[in-house]
Amino acid sequence: MGKMDVVVPEKRTLESKFKFRCHKDIKCFTHCCSNIEILLTPYDVLRLKNRLGILSDVFLDKYTYLKVDEKSSHPHALLTMSDDKDKKCIFLSKEGCTVYTDRPANCRYYPIGQGTFKKDSPEGPVEEEFYFFVKEQHCYGYEEKKNWTIKDWREDQEVALYDEVNREWKGLQLRQNLYGQAGLDEKKQFQFYMASYDLDMFKKYIFESNFLNVFDIDDETLNKIKNDEVELLKFGVKYIKYIMMLEESLKLKDGAEKYQKPKK
Ligand code: SF4
Ligand code: SF4
């Protein structure tokens, strides 16, 4: 979860085996929850803000900080660590994680890391997911005897839903690098961040601004994004693809120009 020097540099598959057990009585219990960078995905934020019963902007203000990726220029939300000397995760208590059933995908995967790469195929570039082990000195879980495959671990940690919802968004991180596109300017960074993380604000933007005068969105889609936050999140990725000029993922309405601000 952020300390790349402990990544075991070998690509693993779902069938890769390892021994591991994490439990309350282990001497390193919660040691992995301090002083780390935990990059949040859109679905992490959705789950956590609903868990806490607050709006996305309040969640982002209170529990996250912003970091712009140097390579891609994408703005990311990272989980806040406290100011004390241990820099504990803001959700950590003596008993463990206070948001356990809604903890972020990175926390679920740990001590497995997950990545995606693009490779060429006769049908064009395809995305392939891979895994790797993260072995930090403070983690004694690898000394335990329980056998796993990565496939079993993923099931146990219930990450499939997270991966499914976040897949296209994660793909965006690759595409910028792969096609060598120019970085995002400030305005696009704002739009990227809002559509990725600030879903309540994004919903307002769709339904309470000129958005629907500019974009041609069918009623079925509108109904879905009004009533289902996962659909809203997926629509957010389409919007990001549009503003990043990766795909014509949204259609402009006839006469939309008059609602768009002139370029400076
Ligand atoms: S969210 Fe929970 S599991 Fe993840 S680092 Fe914080 S306390 Fe640990
Ligand atoms: S350091 Fe490893 S074994 Fe210890 S609590 Fe964290 S994941 Fe579990």
Image: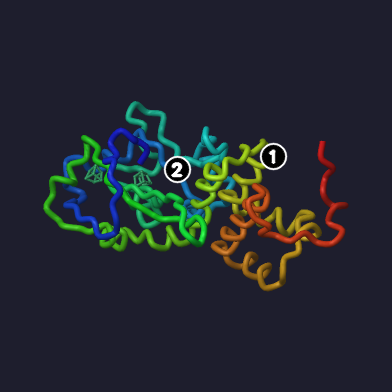
Residue at 63%, 38% in the rendered image: 182
**SS under mark 1:** helix
Considering depth in this image, is 5 or 67 the residue closer to the camera?
5
Q: Which of 47 and 166 is in front in this view?
A: 166
Using the numbered discs, state the Cα–Cα distance from disc 2 to disc 1 in whole angstroms: 22 Å
Give the residue at the far top of this rendering: 85
**Above or below 185: residue 244:** below
Is the N terminus in the top left, top right, bottom left or bottom right quadrant? top left
Q: In this view, does 149 lie to the left or right of 107?
A: left
Kind of residue sitting beneath label 1: Lys
**4 is higher (above) or lower (below) than 207:** above
Label 1 packing within 10 angstroms: few (<14), some (14-19), many (20+): few
Determine if residue 50 is in view.
Answer: no
Q: Quadrant of residue 94?
A: top left
Q: Earlier in the sequence, mark 2 or mark 1?
A: 2
Q: Which residue is drawn at 39% across and 62% down?
A: 160
Question: Which residue has dot 2 on it?
Answer: 39
Q: Which colour scheme is used?
A: rainbow
Q: Could you tell whether 112 is left or right of 173 in the image?
A: left
Q: Classify the position of ligand 2 by quadrant: top left, top right, bottom left or bottom right.
A: top left
What residue lies at 87% left-to-right and 58% top-to-bottom? Answer: 255
- In the displayed structure image, the side of residue 260 where residue 64 appears, left or right: left
From the top left corner, tell me how far across and down residue 117 is, in percent.
43, 49
Where is residue 147 drawn, in percent x and y? 16, 57
Query: Tag on residue 187?
Result: 1
